[in-house]
Amino acid sequence: MGESDGTQQAIQLIDEQKRFHADVLAHFKEWIGHRDVGLNYHVIAVFGSQSSGKSTLLNTLFNTSFDTMDAQFRRQQTTKGIWLAHTNHVNTVTESTAKGSDLFVLDVEGSDGAERGEDQDFERKAALFAIAVSEVLIVNMWEQQIGLYQGNNMALLKTVFEVNLSLFGKNRNGHKVLLLFVIRDHVGLTPMSSLSESLVSELEKIWSELSKPTECSEALLTDFFDLEFVGLAHKLLQPKEFENDVRALGDHFVFENRSSYYFKPAYHHRLPLEGWTIYSQNCWEQIENNKDLDLPTQQILVSRFKTEEIADEALKNFSANYHESIEPMIDDKDKLIRAMKKLRESCLDEYDRQASRYLETEYLEKRQGLQKNMVSKFTATVGEFLTNFSNSLLKATRAAIEDKNSNKSFAERSEASQLSTKEKFAGVVEEFSKEEFISSPGELTCDFENDLLKEVEELREKEITAIMTRAKKTITLTIKDTTISLLSHPELDVWDKVMEMFESTIKESIHKFMEDNGEYNFRVGLSSEQNDKLVRQIYHTGWHLLNVTVHDYLKEDTVVGILRDRFESKFRYDDSGSPRLWKSEEEIDQAFRVAKGHALEVLGVLSLAATSDNVEIIAKFDDCEDEEDEFYKDDVGIYHSKRFAHILNEIQKEKVLQQFRRQINVTVLDSKRSILKSTTS
Ligand code: GDP
Ligand code: MG
């Protein structure tokens, strides 16, 4: 092991027992340090019979330190397995100062030809592995092996091609491998051109004889492989030439801008370095277990695993920073939006930086998932912001609608402020949704508008109640007092007057709500039917009051009293209003008859409420307690009550008459007694 020139020690990737050493990643860290290599690395493997100078070539070319068989101890066996080394330093003809890409070199140590047998299994698997994971496969061979189809190399190649085709044939994705034939001990008698010609025809022959899966029966060797041929001088006999040849070969691995550059993009597996480890481990396990080696599926698995891991980590950092960078901004929309944008960007940046190297479909899918997770977190915060915002918005709206100093009607005020409130809210929601911070902006707006509507409805109810209370208060006072005052001194047309007063009182209480066309509109934003209903309610209150007032007041005793008053004022006072002085009984009897008739004129009027042209007054109620015959409901749902008009029935009238007669008889007797007194004294 030559470590004298500072090269790193090679490590065993797969050991003699065909076990994969998963701790390679730790070595990678050692080799790479903290550099982010990403996709900027290459993998080279070597293939060829044992003791053909493979390790010697790799060490000379790449400054690696694979074990080589010491010329002096030819019996000594190198340790079997697949070995991995790292280098940044390729020997070249042209001096290059720039640090090269990271190269990973796989060396296969099989067993010597002598001990072949069961070990062919290892060699075949190793070759398959080399083809599956590397970009460039060096096929190392002696010049004299060409054209001999000498066992090992070509037979093995045939097997590897076959398995390779059956595995990758269907899902190639344009991926290719460069087969670099390195001819050792090329003395130059046969030019490379003819050597490569015979190699190509040998390969074509192998290819044509392969049993190919049906889906790629027409596939060409060149659909899967690019071919290059290089001859190297004899290391021991022509050490200088050998050295130069190796350096010339080195140029192909270093100078990206030259057309002869070996690492073509089509060879790369497009996996970042850490993904490549998982990928190669999966490859080995599949090969070792003889499972189908499905390259794209492996890539998907790796990509899925890695992108998920990266997304989880990014989300974890996002959540960790959330509290600190977002919560304090909750009261300031612009700051909040800026902070959310910044946090999201940094989360996505973190994800993109690492995950964008993996398969695009997987990368994009996880990215979407990550965004969705962020949105759900943002939505909660925005929801919190909007709750505060909508509360203050509703408060301002309420104040604007309830503004008593405004000379606008409730309907106008509520209409205008609802409109501007909705606009304000929708505007803010739009600001958040434009940035895609919330998942369902429509729902938020809808919820808010429902709240607003409920608020306005509440205020409207309050406004209506206030209007109704005011109206009822005026009519209550007027109707009761005026009705009693009219009924206590009734004339024949008393009900005309009562009804006139009733109508005018109600109309007066709501006259400011009357429109030019005679319809009422309380200007609280109701339909004309709803406005009509309010008018009916006011009438209902009025009728109810009138009904109670009339029936409470016009009890038998009161009616007797009213009749007596009416009698007395006619009987005791003359037409000019002076008290009478009786001179004779005849005079008394005459006046008595007139006064009695005068009084009884209104008994009918007080017993039955009817207009002067004899139409019974029918009360109109919005509802009634019991469905008696006296009620009937009209087409607009109003109950008409006939009971209102019927104040005293025949029996009650009879009682009133009796009492009235008794009382006036007493009055007459007193009057007659007063004449007697004056004549006898
Ligand atoms: P590997 O088993 O293919 O890795 O072969 P090694 O690199 O271990 O070399 C096997 C033997 O071949 C060693 O004794 C080397 O000195 C010798 N050797 C290396 N390179 C050359 C070469 O270019 N020509 C010849 N003839 N022998 C070489
Ligand atoms: Mg070796």
Image: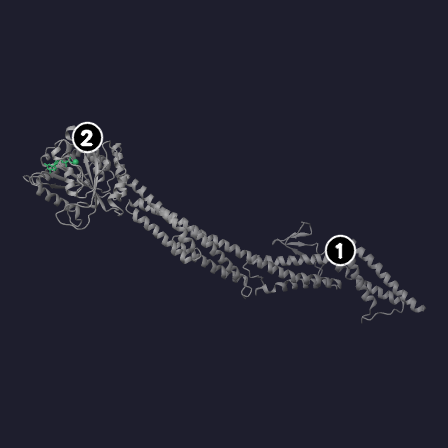
In this picture, is 204 found above or below 95? above
Q: Choose between 457 and 31: the one closer to the eye.
A: 31
Q: Is residue 237 visible?
A: yes
Q: Residue at 81% of width from left, 66% of height from top?
A: 570
Give the label on residue 481, or none.
Answer: none
Residue carrying label 1 = 648
444 lies left or right of 305: right
413 lies left or right of 637: left
Q: Choose between 490 and 337: the one closer to the eye.
A: 337
Q: Secondary structure at mark 2?
A: helix
Q: Is mark 1 within 8 Å of ligand 2?
A: no
Quadrant where the C terminus sits is bottom right
Alpha-carbon neighbours of circle 1 within 10 Å: few (<14), some, or many (≥20)?
Answer: many
Q: Quarter-wise, where is residue 286 in the image?
A: top left
Q: Position of residue 2 (x, y in %)?
A: 17, 40
Q: Choose between 245 and 266: the one closer to the eye.
A: 245
Q: Quarter-wise, where is residue 228 in the image?
A: top left
* Quadrant position of ligand 1: top left
Give the label on residue 120, or none.
Answer: 2
Q: Secondary structure at mark 1?
A: loop
Q: Choose between 537 and 277: the one closer to the eye.
A: 277
Residue that extends furthest to the left in the rendered view of this protein:
189
Q: Position of residue 299 (x, y in %)?
A: 28, 41
444 lies left or right of 585: left
Quadrant where the N terminus sits is top left
* Cα distance in 3D space between marks 2 and 1: 129 Å
Residue that extends furthest to the right in the rendered view of this protein:
680
Q: Is residue 296 visible?
A: no
